[in-house]
Image: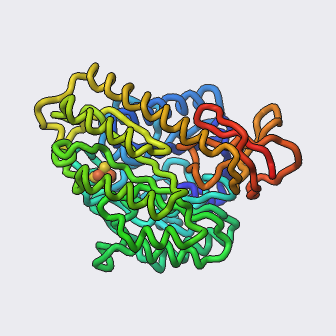
Amino acid sequence: MCIGMFKKEKFEIVTDPKDAEIIVINTCGFIQSAKEEAINTILEMAEYKQTGSCKYLVVMGCLVQRYKKDLEKSIPEVDLFLSIDEYDNMWEKLAGLVGAKKSVNTLDYMNRIVSTGDTTAYLKIAEGCSNRCTYCAIPYIRGPYISRKMEDVLVEAESLAKSGIKELIVIAQDTTKYGIDLYGESKLAELLERLCKIEGFKWIRFLYAYPESITDELIEVIKKNDKICKYFDIPLQHFADPVLKRMNRHSNGESIEKLINKIRKEIPEVILRTTMMVGFPGETEEDFFELYEFVNRAKFEKMGAFKYSKEDGTPAFKLKEQVHPKTKEARLNKLMKLEQKIAEIKLEEKIGNTYSALVEGITPDGKYYIARSYMDIPDEDGVIFIKNTKKIKMGSFVDCKITGVREYDLIAELK
Ligand code: SF4
């Protein structure tokens, strides 16, 4: 939206920060690693004040919401910090900084500029979160879950389709809770069905599904609609009941395993991604072993894992029995080593199969196109390197046959 406001005021949008006079950084302050990444990005971008064209550096998002005062003191290179509370007056503040007119100042989803290329766009269906997992600061930073009205979401989706977007990625902190606050029940399944009716999209995905809110109806809608990618991203965090309970997660090991088995049975070609956390306060060797064994059984095609970090203001901050950093590190390494093996085997199983893939780039030597199939979400998952044997337009879909595996990526040839 911020970029959309600049665009509306006839500022030219550039993608290389070296060329930008105004650099805007959106930050995440959810866990320690995200905070570190955000701070590194701010410092990296601040360098462009010396080496590039940058005159103004603006930082916004969750990190600012949590630590504005500290950031103002410690990073004076930044000209404006915008916390989420200030978004209503966002343009006024930005215009004041860069000397532009102050007339435009509405948080308007229709003004947004798609910053993910010409083919893929994210569609946010809700703000905030009411789940209150005890380790997570998001409900305190972003506030309670507030769904956008379905009609508004559909209008935005239609405009994205008209602008040529082919892959729509539906997001919220927890997409499965969509509509409960507005309509008294989850409306994700209905929303996905209505999105499928919009002409132009080839792929529709949704991310971040809370396990116990995945209903049979939702699985059925995904199963029967060709446009919906057979891909579930279900951040499970853990498997051992005592840990899930202390995390204030509402599922347990048994219900999680049942769900995974049901999805695999109903949609055999499904790709399952999850996120796990190790070293939550009180996690014993037995708890970790249960998690490890579950990951070994569930065979997630994709999995991310991170170490628990103490976050100010969260209930888990006060929990005793913190796990020693070395133990956390060892558990993380052990779990990720297991997942690497699983992911490799899962990729090898794809050799010989043919997939429709979205071509998004080309390697510097021109030998391979870089593409993704329904099995890969942008930036998180691997890609398919397709041998360059004929000219292909960027943003087009091609059929390719998988011939090999390279770490987390696949190699293919055109069909
Ligand atoms: S579901 Fe839990 S982890 Fe995810 S944003 Fe909400 S509170 Fe945080």
273 or 266: nearer the eye?
266
The residue at the far top in this view is 326
Q: Residue at x 63, y 45 (%)?
A: 350
Q: Residue at x 44, y 43 (%)?
A: 299
Instruction: Give how far across and how far down residue 218 sits, in percent.
Output: 42, 70
375 or 404: nearer the eye?
404
Horizontally, is 198 left or right of 33 in the view? right
Instruction: Give how far across and how far down residue 263 sits, in percent.
Output: 42, 60
- The reply to whether residue 1 is in sight is no
Q: Residue at x 25, y 57 (%)?
A: 131
Examine the rendered structure and indicate whether residue 65 appears above or below residue 178: above
Q: How many marks?
A: 0
124 or 78: nearer the eye?
124
Q: Residue at x 49, y 29 (%)?
A: 43
Horizontally, is 135 left or right of 401 in the view? left
- The reply to whether residue 51 is in sight is yes
Residue 305 position by quadrant = top left
Instruction: Give how far across and how far down residue 180 sits, in percent.
Output: 30, 73
Residue 318 position by quadrant = top left
